[in-house]
Amino acid sequence: MSSADRSARPRLVYDDDCGFCTWWAEWAVLNGEFEPRGFSELTDAERDRLPDDWEECVHLLADGTVYSCGAATEEVLARIGTVPPAILGFLNGFSDYEGLRERLYRAAADRRDLLGKVVSAEPPVERRRE
């Protein structure tokens, strides 16, 4: 990985065909330092970095690591400062936390049509102008 890739803004990959997902990405971009990338905008190289079932959830490409689903959501919240690192450190100390985090993520993701009736946004999400 090049030093440019390491210094790049973390890339938030989201389903830009989903109003709720777009709202979430927009919220993350407005509150943190992320480069948004909708599924429809992915390059072949980006898609190759993602897991086989990449269309099933959100991803964060950061510092050479790919975070997916609940792990991506947790990482975004941690980078924004919404969830203090001490709390995440405590939770990650439990052997069953990762499974619980992913089940909670899936419960929300499976209801994104319903959640989109409460909060929704139209793509594209644009990076905050500096």
Image: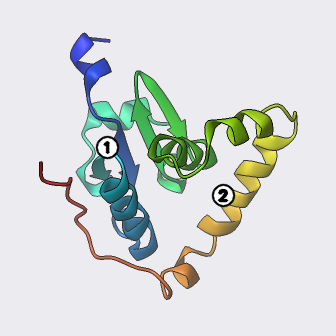
Quadrant of the image occupied by residue 5: top left
Judging from the image, what secondary structure is the residue with disc 1 in?
loop
Image quadrant holding the N terminus, namely top left
> In the image, residue 112 lies at what x, y percent?
55, 74
Q: Tell me what residue is drawn at x 53 percent, y 36 percent.
A: 67
For label 1, the crowd category at 10 Å Cα-Cα, with few meaning under 14, some 14 to 19 and many 20 or more, is some
* Left or right of residue 118, residue 31 in this image: left
Q: Is residue 85 above or below residue 110?
A: above
Quadrant of the image occupied by residue 44: top left
Q: Tell me what residue is drawn at x 78 percent, y 40 percent.
A: 91
Describe the colour scheme in one phrase.
rainbow
What's the mark number on residue 105?
Answer: 2
The answer to whether the residue labelled 1 contacts the one labelled 2, judged by CB atoms less than 8 Å apart, is: no
- Kind of residue at badge 1: Glu
* Left or right of residue 59, residue 84 in this image: right
Q: Tell me what residue is drawn at x 29 percent, y 50 percent.
A: 36
Q: Is residue 21 above or below residue 34?
A: below
Residue that extends furthest to the bottom in the rendered view of this protein: 117
- The mark nearer the N terminus, 1 or 2, is 1
> In the image, residue 89 lies at what x, y percent?
72, 33
> In the image, residue 113 lies at what x, y percent?
53, 80
Q: Nearer the viewer, residue 79 or 4?
A: 79
* Left or right of residue 2, residue 71 in this image: right
Q: Nearer the viewer, residue 94 or 37?
A: 94
Q: Give the residue pinned by disc 1.
A: 33
What's the mark number on residue 103?
Answer: none
* Left or right of residue 67, residue 25 in this image: left
> In the image, residue 90 lies at what x, y percent?
78, 36
Judging from the image, what secondary structure is the residue with disc 2 in?
helix
- Kind of residue at badge 2: Tyr
Residue that extends furthest to the right in the rendered view of this protein: 95
Task: Report the mark closest to the observer, 1 or 2.
Answer: 1
